[in-house]
Amino acid sequence: MAILEIDNLRKHFGGNIVLDGVQLSVEQGEIQAVIGPNGAGKTTLFNIINGIYQASDGSIRFDGREIINRPVHRIAGMGMGRTFQVARVFNEMTLLENMLVPSVRGHMSDRRARERAKELLAMAKLDSLMHQPAVEISGGQKKLLEFMRTMMNDPALVLLDEPFNGINPALIEVLIDIVKSLNKQENKTFLLISHEMPHVSELCDVVTVLAAGGNIAKGTPQEVRENPDVIEAYLGR
Protein backbone atom coordinates (compact mmCIF):
# COMPACT_ATOMS: atom_id res chain seq x y z
CA MET A 1 0.00 0.00 0.00
CA ALA A 2 1.37 3.41 -0.98
CA ILE A 3 1.65 5.90 1.89
CA LEU A 4 2.68 8.71 -0.49
CA GLU A 5 1.45 9.09 -4.07
CA ILE A 6 2.51 12.03 -6.24
CA ASP A 7 0.95 12.48 -9.66
CA ASN A 8 1.89 14.96 -12.39
CA LEU A 9 3.40 17.42 -9.90
CA ARG A 10 4.40 20.74 -11.41
CA LYS A 11 6.06 23.83 -9.97
CA HIS A 12 7.16 27.00 -11.67
CA PHE A 13 8.57 30.21 -10.30
CA GLY A 14 7.51 32.77 -12.87
CA GLY A 15 8.79 31.42 -16.18
CA ASN A 16 11.23 29.01 -14.53
CA ILE A 17 9.85 25.45 -14.54
CA VAL A 18 11.41 23.55 -11.63
CA LEU A 19 9.19 20.45 -11.52
CA ASP A 20 7.51 19.21 -14.68
CA GLY A 21 5.10 16.31 -14.20
CA VAL A 22 6.89 14.43 -11.40
CA GLN A 23 5.50 10.99 -10.49
CA LEU A 24 6.44 9.32 -7.22
CA SER A 25 5.04 6.50 -5.13
CA VAL A 26 6.36 5.37 -1.74
CA GLU A 27 5.09 2.16 -0.17
CA GLN A 28 4.34 1.83 3.54
CA GLY A 29 7.46 0.55 5.33
CA GLU A 30 9.80 1.42 2.45
CA ILE A 31 13.06 3.34 2.52
CA GLN A 32 13.27 5.22 -0.76
CA ALA A 33 15.77 7.78 -2.06
CA VAL A 34 15.34 10.60 -4.55
CA ILE A 35 18.57 11.38 -6.36
CA GLY A 36 19.54 13.57 -9.28
CA PRO A 37 22.08 16.15 -10.42
CA ASN A 38 22.12 19.66 -8.97
CA GLY A 39 19.09 21.61 -10.16
CA ALA A 40 16.94 18.51 -10.62
CA GLY A 41 14.29 19.91 -8.25
CA LYS A 42 14.77 17.53 -5.32
CA THR A 43 14.52 20.01 -2.44
CA THR A 44 11.69 21.86 -4.18
CA LEU A 45 9.88 18.53 -4.31
CA PHE A 46 10.30 18.06 -0.54
CA ASN A 47 9.21 21.65 0.11
CA ILE A 48 5.98 21.04 -1.78
CA ILE A 49 5.31 17.66 -0.17
CA ASN A 50 5.44 19.09 3.35
CA GLY A 51 3.69 22.36 2.50
CA ILE A 52 6.47 24.96 2.50
CA TYR A 53 5.87 25.72 -1.20
CA GLN A 54 2.59 25.62 -3.07
CA ALA A 55 2.43 23.45 -6.19
CA SER A 56 1.45 24.87 -9.56
CA ASP A 57 -0.44 21.70 -10.50
CA GLY A 58 -0.76 18.00 -9.67
CA SER A 59 -1.79 15.76 -6.80
CA ILE A 60 -0.13 14.58 -3.58
CA ARG A 61 -1.91 11.93 -1.52
CA PHE A 62 -0.56 11.06 1.92
CA ASP A 63 -2.06 8.06 3.65
CA GLY A 64 -4.96 8.18 1.18
CA ARG A 65 -5.76 11.88 1.68
CA GLU A 66 -5.08 14.77 -0.69
CA ILE A 67 -2.62 17.18 0.92
CA ILE A 68 -1.44 19.37 -1.93
CA ASN A 69 -1.06 23.01 -0.84
CA ARG A 70 -2.16 22.32 2.73
CA PRO A 71 -0.32 24.25 5.49
CA VAL A 72 2.86 22.78 6.97
CA HIS A 73 1.36 22.28 10.44
CA ARG A 74 -1.63 20.37 9.10
CA ILE A 75 0.56 18.03 7.06
CA ALA A 76 2.81 17.48 10.07
CA GLY A 77 -0.26 16.80 12.19
CA MET A 78 -1.30 14.06 9.77
CA GLY A 79 1.93 12.17 10.50
CA MET A 80 4.69 13.54 8.28
CA GLY A 81 8.11 14.54 9.64
CA ARG A 82 10.85 16.52 7.91
CA THR A 83 14.53 17.33 8.38
CA PHE A 84 16.57 19.90 6.47
CA GLN A 85 19.94 20.12 4.74
CA VAL A 86 21.11 22.49 7.48
CA ALA A 87 19.79 21.33 10.84
CA ARG A 88 17.21 23.57 12.46
CA VAL A 89 17.69 23.36 16.22
CA PHE A 90 17.31 25.80 19.11
CA ASN A 91 20.93 26.57 19.94
CA GLU A 92 20.32 28.11 23.37
CA MET A 93 18.21 25.19 24.54
CA THR A 94 19.68 21.96 25.85
CA LEU A 95 19.38 18.84 23.73
CA LEU A 96 16.66 17.54 26.04
CA GLU A 97 14.72 20.81 25.82
CA ASN A 98 14.99 20.68 22.02
CA MET A 99 13.54 17.19 22.06
CA LEU A 100 10.58 18.29 24.18
CA VAL A 101 9.49 21.15 21.88
CA PRO A 102 7.20 18.95 19.70
CA SER A 103 5.48 17.53 22.79
CA VAL A 104 4.04 20.94 23.70
CA ARG A 105 1.11 20.25 21.36
CA GLY A 106 1.35 16.49 21.51
CA HIS A 107 -0.75 13.90 23.24
CA MET A 108 1.90 12.53 25.60
CA SER A 109 2.11 13.33 29.27
CA ASP A 110 5.13 15.35 30.38
CA ARG A 111 6.59 12.26 31.99
CA ARG A 112 6.15 10.10 28.88
CA ALA A 113 7.54 12.88 26.67
CA ARG A 114 10.71 13.07 28.76
CA GLU A 115 11.05 9.27 28.71
CA ARG A 116 10.63 9.15 24.94
CA ALA A 117 13.09 12.03 24.46
CA LYS A 118 15.71 10.22 26.53
CA GLU A 119 15.11 6.95 24.63
CA LEU A 120 15.63 8.69 21.29
CA LEU A 121 18.72 10.59 22.47
CA ALA A 122 20.20 7.29 23.67
CA MET A 123 19.46 5.72 20.28
CA ALA A 124 21.46 8.56 18.68
CA LYS A 125 24.22 8.25 21.27
CA LEU A 126 23.51 11.80 22.43
CA ASP A 127 22.13 10.99 25.89
CA SER A 128 25.36 11.93 27.65
CA LEU A 129 25.00 15.44 26.18
CA MET A 130 21.31 15.92 26.94
CA HIS A 131 21.84 18.79 29.40
CA GLN A 132 24.27 20.71 27.17
CA PRO A 133 23.12 23.64 25.02
CA ALA A 134 22.77 22.62 21.37
CA VAL A 135 25.18 25.39 20.38
CA GLU A 136 27.99 23.32 21.93
CA ILE A 137 27.57 20.20 19.75
CA SER A 138 28.88 19.57 16.24
CA GLY A 139 26.96 20.14 13.03
CA GLY A 140 26.62 16.41 12.55
CA GLN A 141 25.25 15.96 16.05
CA LYS A 142 22.76 18.76 15.39
CA LYS A 143 21.49 16.85 12.35
CA LEU A 144 21.02 13.78 14.52
CA LEU A 145 19.26 15.89 17.16
CA GLU A 146 16.89 17.35 14.57
CA PHE A 147 16.14 13.88 13.24
CA MET A 148 15.41 12.43 16.66
CA ARG A 149 13.26 15.44 17.56
CA THR A 150 11.22 14.75 14.41
CA MET A 151 10.51 11.26 15.77
CA MET A 152 8.96 12.64 18.95
CA ASN A 153 5.57 13.00 17.25
CA ASP A 154 5.68 9.42 15.96
CA PRO A 155 5.46 10.27 12.23
CA ALA A 156 4.42 7.59 9.76
CA LEU A 157 6.60 9.12 7.00
CA VAL A 158 9.85 11.04 7.44
CA LEU A 159 11.47 13.19 4.74
CA LEU A 160 15.25 13.36 5.19
CA ASP A 161 16.90 16.13 3.16
CA GLU A 162 20.60 15.33 2.56
CA PRO A 163 20.93 13.53 5.92
CA PHE A 164 24.57 12.53 5.35
CA ASN A 165 25.95 15.99 4.49
CA GLY A 166 28.31 17.43 7.09
CA ILE A 167 28.35 14.29 9.24
CA ASN A 168 31.52 12.34 10.00
CA PRO A 169 31.64 8.63 9.06
CA ALA A 170 30.99 7.43 12.61
CA LEU A 171 27.82 9.51 12.90
CA ILE A 172 26.68 8.40 9.44
CA GLU A 173 26.77 4.79 10.63
CA VAL A 174 24.76 5.78 13.71
CA LEU A 175 22.19 7.50 11.47
CA ILE A 176 21.95 4.52 9.11
CA ASP A 177 21.49 2.15 12.06
CA ILE A 178 18.73 4.36 13.49
CA VAL A 179 16.83 4.51 10.20
CA LYS A 180 17.09 0.75 9.75
CA SER A 181 15.97 0.13 13.33
CA LEU A 182 12.98 2.48 13.14
CA ASN A 183 12.03 1.01 9.80
CA LYS A 184 12.19 -2.59 11.01
CA GLN A 185 10.94 -2.24 14.59
CA GLU A 186 8.37 0.56 14.22
CA ASN A 187 7.53 0.18 10.50
CA LYS A 188 8.53 3.79 9.79
CA THR A 189 8.68 4.89 6.17
CA PHE A 190 11.51 7.12 4.93
CA LEU A 191 11.99 9.20 1.80
CA LEU A 192 15.40 10.80 1.53
CA ILE A 193 17.40 13.04 -0.77
CA SER A 194 21.09 12.28 -1.05
CA HIS A 195 24.09 12.51 -3.35
CA GLU A 196 25.87 9.77 -1.39
CA MET A 197 25.22 6.67 -3.51
CA PRO A 198 27.20 4.26 -1.28
CA HIS A 199 24.94 5.17 1.65
CA VAL A 200 21.83 5.16 -0.54
CA SER A 201 22.76 1.67 -1.75
CA GLU A 202 23.24 0.46 1.82
CA LEU A 203 19.99 1.91 3.11
CA CYS A 204 17.39 2.13 0.36
CA ASP A 205 15.10 -0.41 -1.28
CA VAL A 206 14.12 1.86 -4.17
CA VAL A 207 15.67 4.89 -5.86
CA THR A 208 13.80 7.47 -7.93
CA VAL A 209 15.91 9.65 -10.21
CA LEU A 210 15.00 13.20 -11.22
CA ALA A 211 16.68 15.34 -13.86
CA ALA A 212 15.60 18.73 -15.21
CA GLY A 213 12.50 18.59 -13.03
CA GLY A 214 11.15 15.27 -14.26
CA ASN A 215 11.46 11.53 -13.71
CA ILE A 216 14.05 9.61 -15.68
CA ALA A 217 14.35 6.31 -13.78
CA LYS A 218 13.20 4.22 -10.84
CA GLY A 219 14.50 0.92 -9.52
CA THR A 220 16.91 -0.71 -7.13
CA PRO A 221 20.19 1.12 -6.46
CA GLN A 222 22.01 -1.27 -8.82
CA GLU A 223 19.44 -0.85 -11.59
CA VAL A 224 19.66 2.92 -11.29
CA ARG A 225 23.47 2.95 -11.34
CA GLU A 226 23.45 0.96 -14.60
CA ASN A 227 20.67 2.95 -16.30
CA PRO A 228 21.98 4.78 -19.41
CA ASP A 229 19.63 7.74 -18.87
CA VAL A 230 20.94 8.21 -15.33
CA ILE A 231 24.56 8.00 -16.48
CA GLU A 232 23.84 10.62 -19.14
CA ALA A 233 22.07 12.93 -16.69
CA TYR A 234 25.11 12.94 -14.38
CA LEU A 235 27.94 12.72 -16.88
CA GLY A 236 26.54 13.90 -20.22
CA ARG A 237 26.87 12.04 -23.48
Image: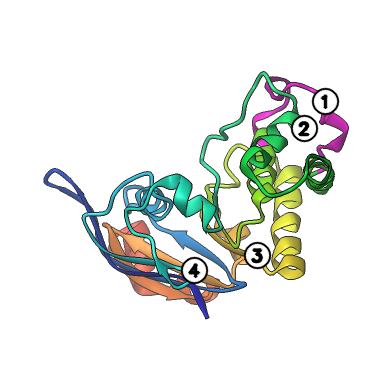
Q: Residues within 10 Å of mark 2 (few under 14, many from 20)?
A: many
- Residue denoted by label 1: 131
Q: Are marks 3 and 4 in contact (CB under 8 Å)?
A: no
Q: Residues within 10 Å of mark 3 (few under 14, many from 20)?
A: many
Q: Is residue 95 left or right of residue 47?
A: right
N-term-proximal mark, 4 vs 1: 1
Is 71 rendered above or below residue 206? above
Mark 4–mark 2 Cα distance, whole angstroms, equals 34 Å
Mark 4–mark 1 Cα distance, whole angstroms, equals 38 Å
Residue depth check, mark 4 versus mark 1: number of the one nearer the observer:
1
Choose top left, top right, bottom left or bottom right for residue 157: bottom right
**Residue extent of the magenta highlight:** 125-140
* Amino acid carrying mark 1 in the image: His
Q: Is residue 43 magenta?
A: no
Residue depth check, mark 4 versus mark 2: number of the one nearer the observer:
2
Mark 1–mark 3 Cα distance, whole angstroms, equals 28 Å
Which mark is on residue 188?
A: 3
- Residue denoted by label 2: 96
- Residue denoted by label 4: 207
* Amino acid carrying mark 2 in the image: Leu
Quadrant for the C terminus, please: bottom left
